[in-house]
Image: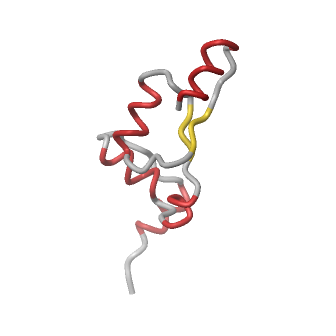
């Protein structure tokens, strides 16, 4: 994160942190401490497409479901 933080502070350019970030707490700490503006997940997201939602839930953040999924969740199961 030091590289991202240095670029962000010296240039004012928004930066993203990537690599070896595996928990919601760690990702939140990086953004809250201004080390990066965004945290990106590669392989972890491919392995778990609901990773952002799971992290939001762990952090107590309410995330709205997309309309397409809301409609599907409202359908009765067969």
Instruction: From this view, report whether residue 18 is shown above or below residue 13.
Output: below
Quadrant of res 3: top right
Query: What residue lies at 33% left-to-right and 48% top-to-bottom?
Result: 57
Quarter of the C terminus within the rendering: bottom left
Instruction: From this view, report whether residue 45 is shown above or below residue 64.
Output: below
Q: Is residue 22 left or right of residue 43?
A: left
Image coords of residue 68 (percent x, y): 55, 61
Query: What residue lies at 46% left-to-right and 50% top-to-bottom?
Result: 52
Query: What residue lies at 42% left-to-right and 44% top-to-bottom?
Result: 63
Instruction: From this view, report whether residue 12 is shown above or below residue 42.
Output: above
Image coords of residue 34 (percent x, y): 49, 21
Badge count: 0
Front residue of 48/21: it is: 21
In the picture as drawn, the residue positioned furthest to the front comes out as 2
Instruction: From this view, report whether residue 54 is shown above or below residue 16.
Output: below
Image coords of residue 16 (percent x, y): 61, 34
Image coords of residue 40 (percent x, y): 57, 44
Q: How does the figure colour the protein chain or chains?
A: secondary structure
Front residue of 72/43: it is: 43
Query: What residue lies at 60% left-to-right and 28% top-to-bottom?
Result: 4
Quadrant of res 30: top left
Front residue of 15/54: it is: 15
């Amino acid at each position: 994160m030091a590289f991202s933080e240095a670029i962000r502070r010296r240039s004012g350019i928004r930066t993203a942190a990537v690599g070896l970030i595996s928990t919601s707490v760690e990702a939140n700490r990086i953004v809250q401490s201004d080390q990066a503006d965004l945290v990106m997940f590669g392989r972890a997201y491919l392995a778990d497409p609901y990773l952002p939602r799971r992290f939001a839930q762990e952090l107590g953040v309410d995330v709205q479901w997309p309309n397409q999924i809301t409609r599907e969740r409202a359908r009765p199961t067969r």
